[in-house]
Amino acid sequence: MMFAVAAMAHAGSVYVPVDSWTYPAAERLAVLTETRLEVLGLRPWTRLQFARFLERAREMPHGSEADGLQSRLEAEFAPELNGQSETVKLESTYTRNMEIAGTPIRDSYHFGQTIVNDFGRPYGQGLNSIEGASGYAQERATMLYVRGEYQHGASLRAPSLATLDAEAIADSECGIGACNTSKVLSQGGPAVDHFRLLDSYVGASFAGFTATLGKQSLWYGPGAGGAMLESNNAEPIWMARLTNDFPARLPVLGHFRMDMFYGQLQGRRYLPGPWLHGETISFQPFSSLEIGFTRTVQFLGDGRPFTWRRLWRSYFNLDDGPRGSASNTTANDPGDRRSSVTFTWKLPRVPAKLYLDSFSDDDPSPLANPSRASYHPGLYIAELPGALHKLDLRMEGGFTSSVNGTIPPGFNYWNTVYKDGYTNKGLMIGDAIGRESVYLQGWSTYWLSPRNKIQLSYRHRTIGPRFMPGGGTQGVFSATSNMMIRQNFELELGFQSERNNMPLLLGSGAKFDTTGWTGIRFWPSHKAKPRTDDDL
């Protein structure tokens, strides 16, 4: 089979969506078997990347849990493992109904979100629903992927004038005696009913690279609760993207993968139409270690047309003005720059890994000025010992409130020119933790089988009072289950209870909201596998 996959090296292969069940399964398999090379913190992967990963994993020692994961993933990517290139296929159709009782929050730029990492889908108090489908076509070196859905979001209560004033102050949109609240990104509005494309693109593969053009979601980071620079928290961005799906090798640094994109942001109020470009590279100097470097720059937009000088400065300028000057004018502004450094270390002799996602605003790297940076560390234990071998455990934390007292509150993810900050259509592109916040989260998943699992999670978040008067806390408990029914249907059931204490946004005292949802996904017959223990 390795020859079959290698023979398809230049075949077009679509990307697997970042919310697919295959990523948690592959991550657990990688930790249990110590299989490396594909970068888990740089997603999405193509279907061929999954096939190559599974071929390497097959050669590693397996226990009973790893055997089940290997078998189920190989069934999913059987065409690629057998050297077959699927042509035109319907991937799946799905629906989800979500009921929210109480007042949720949907303003990650100032207060937070009740529902995170959900492609920016609308939600409010009451019934929220989606109905969607996805499919793809692959022909030789070319590919097409389309995913679209009808979205209904219930209405959401708008914030008070006092809240809008405080948000304007946090965004530095206040003059002498008055604040301009007309451009503040805030929650609230009537019910939403619209059709939206999610990941939808055309592309081609050549010489180990894949180039794509269209609407795309990225995830740059090793964590599960969020990624500092690129996640699926906001609606996918229209972009042109180039990545080397086949890792290359450098002396000393080992195998590496790189990814770069250009995209335009939407839903901006302060300075419409800015562009965002990003570049990331990840190295594996040792089989147990991954190190990644990422940089994104927000530039151009209304009143800042493209010039070669602006493009050059967005890549190579390290200060805010020309050499010897600290001025920041429209002509010389290099853009709103952010950088991150990530690392993942597979611990020796135990099925666990440590990881860190660090982020810096305006500095060339978090390593250049650690006291200004933000951090998102985590620990993932893929299998607990003994009778608990079907359980895993993940713990993450993070903060965006700088420990440097000279930095104004809310500095990270904000900019003096691009006051909408690091958002697309009002929600954070990076970590939904938002600005000036500290958070902790823990998960435990019981793997009944690779496709049938139950997960419990708790997330706690604190907003600094220097940023929003009165500060705030958010506590979220959730329980979800995913079960395969027969061969073609997947059932998802979820429950979430949230406690918010945010005086400025919700009034005095703790406020509670409860969310419940049911999702059904249909996999067509070509995706249905022979009946296994997954099926109920």
Image: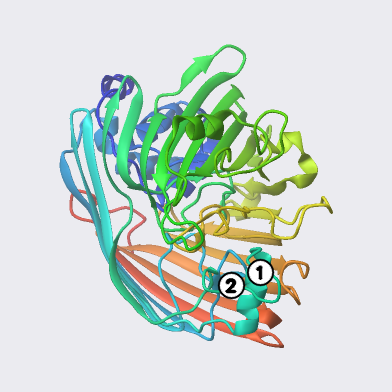
Identify the residue shown where x is 71% and y is 74%. Answer: 472
User: Where residue 344 sits: x, y (%)?
Assistant: 63, 36
**Residue at the image point whose x is 76% and y is 77% from the top:** 470
Q: Are marks 2 and 1 in contact (CB under 8 Å)?
A: yes
Report which residue position mark 1 lands on.
174
Side of 317 where 149 appears, left or right: left
Residue 12 appears in the picture as rendered: yes
**Where residue 353 appears, x then y in whole percent?**
64, 40
Q: Position of residue 323 (x, y in %)?
A: 68, 28
Q: In the figure, is residue 495 to the left or right of 112?
A: left
How many marks on residues?
Answer: 2
Q: Where is residue 80, by image quadrant? A: top left
Q: Amino acid at mark 1?
A: Cys
Q: In this figure, which residue is indicated by the disc labeled 2?
A: 180
Image spot of residue 333 (x, y percent): 58, 41
Would residue 484 be found to the left or right of residue 428 on screen?
A: left
**SS class of the residue under badge 2?**
loop
**Between 225 and 504, which is closer to the camera in this rendering?**
504
Which residue is rendered at x = 77% and y = 70% of the image? 465
Q: Does residue 10 sit above or below 272 in this rendering? A: above
